[in-house]
């Protein structure tokens, strides 16, 4: 039911599927309109928003032939943009033979329909565009289910659009509808049924993921989660630290599904590193809800590494967007996992700016300047991650039965055993453990 990109067939104008979703072809010629809405606290310049919108379009192979910001002094309920602005866009689309208009803002269904009528092209808003990217990139069964659920929630609101095929009435004996049921009612019910089925499947996935997390909590391995704005370099850093080759390209949302691999850090037998979905400004609410289960991996981490693109002109605004998402997950509260900032892409800075940034980083223990591409700074990052994982360690005196070899091995792998004495059938140990590891050890049933 969700829109899908098509490789070999260019859609005709108003080529919709049965639920109101448009199809967008790779190579589609598009015009991007970036509304500058009268809202307080705008974090980004118009130029930065235009560039990001172009990047989103490029992520799924759309050919952007023009992109322009439009200052909106008063929002028009019918089209969002002003009459003259809509006429300007229509003329530009006609001149450039564009078949798609991308509006970098959420559109109401009626606004989308009216813009299609007045501009003479297909129209998608920022939410629809991001959903298209996620639909193409999701690789795992869970990711695909999450994206489909978000698509269906988005499309459910589009069914108010007055297309004739949605206004027909069904007969009284059909499988899909009772007496007098309209097509739009049947479509809405089909969407509700499918959404309910997906939610049940995702609930099962969530339970399985929770069991896996519980198992990891009992295992002697801490978890480090990489988070950051999309295209900040998380996957490149992940590959550098793990020796893996997960997909890492200069594209927005190159990684959607979480990937976990083990790495070695000083003082630890094994550490699990998790690469997560990138964040973005104004992330559609449908996707925040759909990917909450995936982001729970971040909540259960022992350490969060916030990877930042320090070469980006809007790096501070991007950092605030990431902080907003982490706050929504309760990761800014007391008791949240410790954090590090990996200031990435320092190799792209000018000599003067790099020197200033390095001096600033020296004054902060929670910051490590790096280049995931060249490997600069990664040794220091590993040391800082190890230090953070071992923060607040205390020495505990523990007695175990000599036959409890698995727990003794757990302590050697996860903590620093300072002394071990065998007394008949009992082993006495002095072990330095972090608060998290002490809590984990207690959860094993040790006393």
Image (tube, helix red, strand yellow):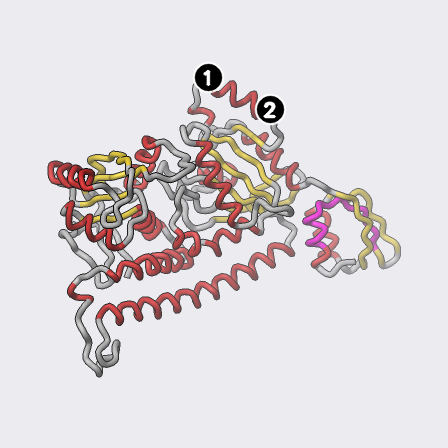
Which of pointers 1 and 2 lies earlier in the amino acid sequence? 1
**363 or 78, nearer to the observer:** 78
Residue 413 visible, this angle: no
Residue position marked by numbered label 2 in the rendering: 362
Image position of 127 with respect to 370: above or below: below
Magenta residues, start to end: 427-441
**348 or 42, nearer to the observer:** 42
Q: Residue at (25%, 34%) from the top-left corner?
A: 68
Residue position marked by numbered label 1 in the rendering: 351
Q: Residue at (26%, 36%) from the top-left corner?
A: 70
Count residues near mark 1 (Cα–Cα under 10 Å), then give few for <14, some for 14-19, many for 20+. few
Q: Residue furthest right?
A: 424
Q: Position of residue 172 (x, y in %)?
A: 21, 82
Q: Residue furthest top?
A: 352
Q: Position of residue 140 (x, y in %)?
A: 40, 55
Q: Position of residue 134 (x, y in %)?
A: 35, 50
Image position of 397 with respect to 72: above or below: below
Count residues near mark 2 (Cα–Cα under 10 Å), then give few for <14, some for 14-19, many for 20+. few
* Magenta-span inclusion, residue 440: yes
Q: Residue at (47%, 46%) from the top-left corner?
A: 276
Q: Tell me how far mark 1 sits from mark 2, CA to CA.
A: 17 Å
Q: Residue furthest bottom?
A: 173
Q: Quadrant of residue 313?
A: top left
Residue 164 visible, this angle: yes
Please indicate whether residue 216 sits to the left or right of residue 232 in the image. right
**405 or 121, nearer to the observer:** 121
Instruction: Give the structural element (helix, strand or loop) at label 2.
Output: helix
């Amino acid at each position: 039911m969700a829109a899908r990109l098509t490789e070999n067939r260019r859609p005709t104008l108003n080529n919709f599927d049965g639920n109101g979703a448009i199809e967008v072809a790779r190579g589609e010629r598009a015009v991007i309109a970036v509304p500058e809405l009268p809202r307080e606290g705008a974090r980004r310049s118009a130029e930065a928003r235009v560039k990001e919108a172009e990047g989103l379009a490029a992520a799924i192979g759309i050919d952007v032939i023009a992109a322009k910001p439009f200052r909106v002094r008063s929002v028009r309920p019918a089209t969002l943009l002003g009459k003259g602005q809509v006429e300007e866009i229509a003329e530009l689309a006609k001149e450039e033979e564009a078949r798609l208009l991308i509006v970098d803002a959420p559109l109401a269904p009626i606004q989308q329909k009216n813009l299609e009528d007045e501009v003479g092209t297909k129209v998608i808003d920022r939410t629809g565009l991001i959903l298209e990217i996620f639909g193409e990139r999701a690789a795992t069964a869970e990711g695909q289910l999450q994206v489909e659920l978000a698509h269906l929630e988005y499309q459910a609101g589009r069914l108010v659009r007055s297309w004739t095929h949605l206004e027909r009435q069904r007969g009284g004996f059909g499988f899909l509808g009772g007496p007098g049921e309209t097509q739009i009612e049947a479509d809405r019910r089909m969407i509700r049924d499918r959404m309910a089925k997906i939610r049940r499947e995702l609930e099962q996935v969530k339970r399985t993921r929770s069991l896996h997390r519980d198992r990891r909590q009992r295992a002697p391995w801490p978890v480090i989660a990489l988070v950051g704005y999309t295209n900040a370099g998380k996957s490149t850093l992940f590959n550098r630290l793990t020796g893996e080759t997960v997909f890492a390209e200069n594209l927005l949302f190159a990684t959607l599904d979480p990937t976990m691999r083990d790495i070695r850090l000083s003082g630890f037998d094994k550490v699990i590193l998790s690469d997560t979905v990138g964040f973005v400004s104004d992330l559609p609410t449908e996707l925040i809800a759909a990917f909450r289960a995936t982001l729970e991996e971040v909540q259960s981490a022992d350490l969060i590494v916030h990877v930042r693109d320090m070469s980006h002109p809007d790096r501070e605004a991007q950092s605030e967007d990431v902080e907003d998402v982490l706050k929504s997950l309760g990761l800014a509260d007391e008791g949240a996992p410790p954090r590090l900032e990996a200031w990435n892409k320092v190799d792209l800075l000018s000599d003067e700016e790099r020197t200033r940034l390095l001096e600033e980083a020296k004054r902060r223990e929670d910051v490590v300047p790096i280049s995931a591409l060249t490997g600069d700074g990664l040794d220091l990052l590993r040391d800082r991650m190890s230090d953070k994982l071992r923060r607040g360690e205390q020495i505990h005196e523990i007695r175990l039965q000599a036959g409890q070899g698995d727990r003794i091995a757990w302590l050697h792998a996860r903590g620093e055993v300072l002394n071990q004495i065998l007394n008949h059938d009992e082993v006495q140990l002095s072990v330095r453990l972090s608060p998290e590891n002490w809590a984990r050890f207690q959860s094993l049933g040790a006393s």
